[in-house]
Image (cartoon, rainbow, N blue to C red):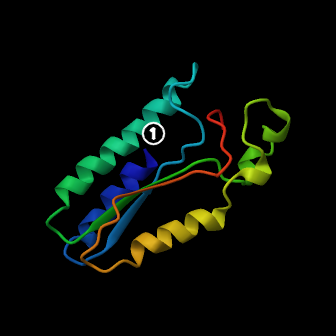
Amino acid sequence: MAPFLVTRALVPISRGAARSLRHHRVHFRPCSVYGSTAYAASKFGLRGMHEVLRAELSRTGVRTTLVSPGPVDTSMWDPIDPDAQPGFTKRSAMLQAGDVAEAVLFAVTRAPRVDVTEIRLLPTVYSLRG
């Protein structure tokens, strides 16, 4: 719900100003894993919102990018301890927040004629579970 509300607030001030909107779709496990119905719905929902928004804004100069990083080593993983869980990406192999930031910076610093519509980042060593 938060990405929708933020986007709804930003679109009116972005139109015609050649601004950029970025949607971050945290994607640290596959959506087809048993028991992940709500997770999958939220991720596919954000993707769908991004696709429609991109189409609606295509003639306004507003650029949109869907950023889909794999597992990123943050404190969110502390209670899970992926290093001790079979099938999880080890924290030392996870992306760092700076990796995602660099990808976003790449998208927003392209020439105004370029719209980087999607970025998917995965660690080199990656487990589908997380």
Comparing 32 with 40, the one in front is 32
Above or below, comparing residue 85 to residue 48 in the picture = above
Quadrant of the rendering where the C terminus is positioned: top right
- Location of residue 42 in the rendering, given as x and y in whole percent from the top left corner: 45, 36
Q: Residue furthest left?
A: 59
Q: Residue furthest top?
A: 34
- Location of residue 64 in the rendering, given as x and y in whole percent from the top left corner: 32, 62
Q: Amino acid at mark 1?
A: Lys
Residue at x 57%, y 19% (from the top left corner): 34
Q: Which residue is mark 1?
A: 43
Above or below, comparing residue 109 to residue 104 in the picture = below
Quadrant of the rendering where the N terminus is positioned: top left
- In the drawing, does residue 84 fall left or right of residue 112? right
- Location of residue 63 in the rendering, given as x and y in whole percent from the top left corner: 29, 67
Residue at x 51%, y 25% (from the top left corner): 32
Check disc 1: other Cα within 10 Å, few if <14, some if 14-19, many if 20+: some
Residue at x 38%, y 52% (from the top left corner): 5
Residue at x 57%, y 63% (from the top left corner): 100
Q: Identify the secondary structure beneath mark 1.
A: helix
- In the drawing, does residue 124 fall left or right of residue 30? right
| Total numbered circles | 1
